[in-house]
């Protein structure tokens, strides 16, 4: 995967995380949604682990009314939560294996 695509995926994940943890009245929300729309085309391919976030982010961008936006935001929140939970587990497992390999007791 190219560096540009890697950066696009990271930007999408960071923006999605920002959107689901920020205030709905946040003055940067519209700007972040616009940036998400710009970066999404470079996120069409990539790891399956980010596919739910990508799909929910796309739904946030195309939502036409408050009800659709509300549903899309819930889906995005769930996708980001699942991605972070899975990532935390994978990172923790990798850390533990490396620590044990180095003789540390964990």
Image: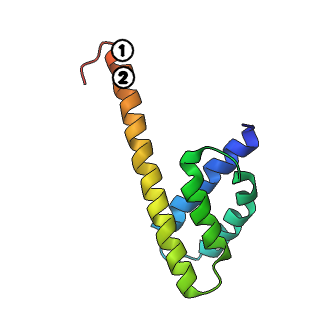
Q: Position of residue 97 (x, y in %)?
A: 36, 23
- Label 1, label 2: how far apart the Cα atoms are: 6 Å
- Pick whichever, 75 or 33, lies toward us: 75
35 is higher (above) or lower (below) than 2? below
Callout 1–callout 2 Cβ contact below 8 Å: yes
Q: Does the rendering let one see residue 18? A: yes
- Pick whichever, 11 or 94, lies toward us: 94
Q: How is the image coloured?
A: rainbow
- Is disc 1 placed on a helix, strand or loop? helix
Q: With 95 as the anchor, is 1 left or right in this view?
A: right
Q: With 66 as the anchor, is 96 left or right in this view?
A: left
Residue 101 badge: 1
Q: Looking at the rendering, in which quadrant would you find the C terminus?
A: top left
Q: Does the rendering let one see residue 22? A: no
Query: Which residue is at 67% across, 63% downward?
Result: 36
Q: Find residue 14 and report its image quarter.
A: bottom right
58 is higher (above) or lower (below) than 87? below
- Pick whichever, 38 or 72, lies toward us: 72
Query: Which residue is at 68% across, 45% downward?
Result: 7
Q: Position of residue 6 (x, y in %)?
A: 68, 42
Q: Position of residue 4 (x, y in %)?
A: 75, 43
Residue 82 badge: none
Residue 97 badge: 2
- Is disc 2 placed on a helix, strand or loop? helix
Q: Find residue 59 and report its image quarter.
A: bottom right
Q: Which residue extends farthest left?
A: 105
31 is higher (above) or lower (below) than 8? below
- Pick whichever, 33 or 26, lies toward us: 33
Query: Which residue is at 34% across, 26% downward?
Result: 96
Q: Find residue 29 and report its image quarter.
A: bottom right
Q: Looking at the rendering, in which quadrant would you find the N terminus?
A: top right
Residues packed near mark 1 inside 10 Å, few (<14), some (14 to 19) or many (20 plus): few
């Amino acid at each position: 995967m190219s560096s540009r695509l890697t950066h696009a995926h990271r930007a999408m994940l960071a923006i999605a995380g920002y959107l689901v943890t920020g205030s709905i009245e946040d003055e940067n929300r519209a700007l972040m949604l616009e940036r998400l729309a710009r970066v999404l085309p470079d996120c069409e391919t990539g790891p399956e682990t980010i596919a739910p976030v990508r799909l929910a982010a796309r739904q946030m961008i195309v939502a036409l009314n408050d009800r659709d936006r509300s549903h899309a935001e819930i889906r995005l929140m769930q996708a980001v939560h699942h991605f972070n939970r899975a990532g935390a587990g994978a990172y923790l497992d990798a850390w533990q294996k490396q620590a044990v390999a180095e003789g540390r007791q964990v």
